[in-house]
Amino acid sequence: MEKEKYIQDLRQIKEIMDRSSKFISLSGLSGVAAGIIALAGAWYAYRNIYTESDFYGYQVVTISSESIASIIGLGIVILVLAIGAGVFFTAKKAKKANQKVWNSQAKRLLINLSIPLVTGGLLSLISLSRGFIGIIAPLTLIFYGLALVNASKYTHEEIRSLGIIEIALGLLSAYFIGFGLLFWAIGFGLLHIVYGIIMHYRYGS
């Protein structure tokens, strides 16, 4: 009995330490919402911006240089909507748990997430301006994965595995140039939905 009580006390201490060092208000529903928004954006790009072309016997999608402004605009819209959904669901979860959304843990999470994310975003814009369109999807996936891995120590551990998968998907996308939109939809769309559902059932809304 004393041994079991000792183990239980250790678990409670560990939970308290995790709460004080990690941002645990991150909502799984925000991941689901971001995934749906990304899939909607990929579908819109496929129907209105990209054009089909033949690539070693496969039908792939390419983008013309005239559509660069449209891609940038669409990316901004997707980013704003995804961030807005994330803030909404995370704030809702924090309020339900009687916790603050903006605290020292959230600041550390945001800083460690932003450094690789901003770097990748700027590199993608530079590549886009130089006409290296095929490398955009791999760059965004790889740097997003690096951002998740870098920030994972300040939130739920599942974020780290998601980041590793995003990096692997980005490398595959770099090898299969021409299928970037498909890999982008999988990485930012389907994976977000799957991980969002997993986190929702593990940690609540």
Image: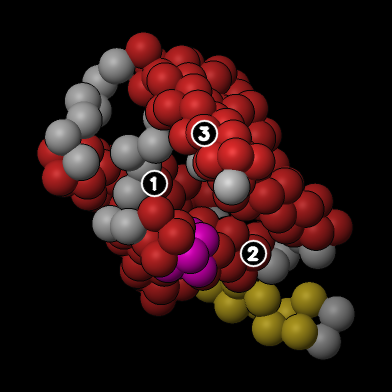
Quarter of the image where the C terminus is located: bottom left
Secondary element at tag 2: helix
Question: Residue drawn at (36%, 12%), measured in percent from left and top?
Answer: 104
Q: Mark 2, mark 3: which one is toward the viewer?
A: 3
Residue 156 horizontal/vertical position (percent): 52, 41
Marks 1/2: CA–CA distance: 15 Å
Residue 75: which numbered mark, if any? 1
The magenta region covers 192-198
- Does label 2 or label 3 sit earlier along the sequence? 3
Q: Nearer the viewer, residue 4 or 195?
A: 4
Per the image, the residue denoted by label 3 is: 9
Decide if residue 117 is in sight here: no
Residue 183: which numbered mark, if any? 2
Q: Count all numbered tags in the image, as a single digit.
A: 3
Q: Is residue 91 left or right of residue 43?
A: left
- Does label 3 or label 1 sit earlier along the sequence? 3
Question: Residue drawn at (25%, 21%), measured in percent from left and top?
Answer: 102
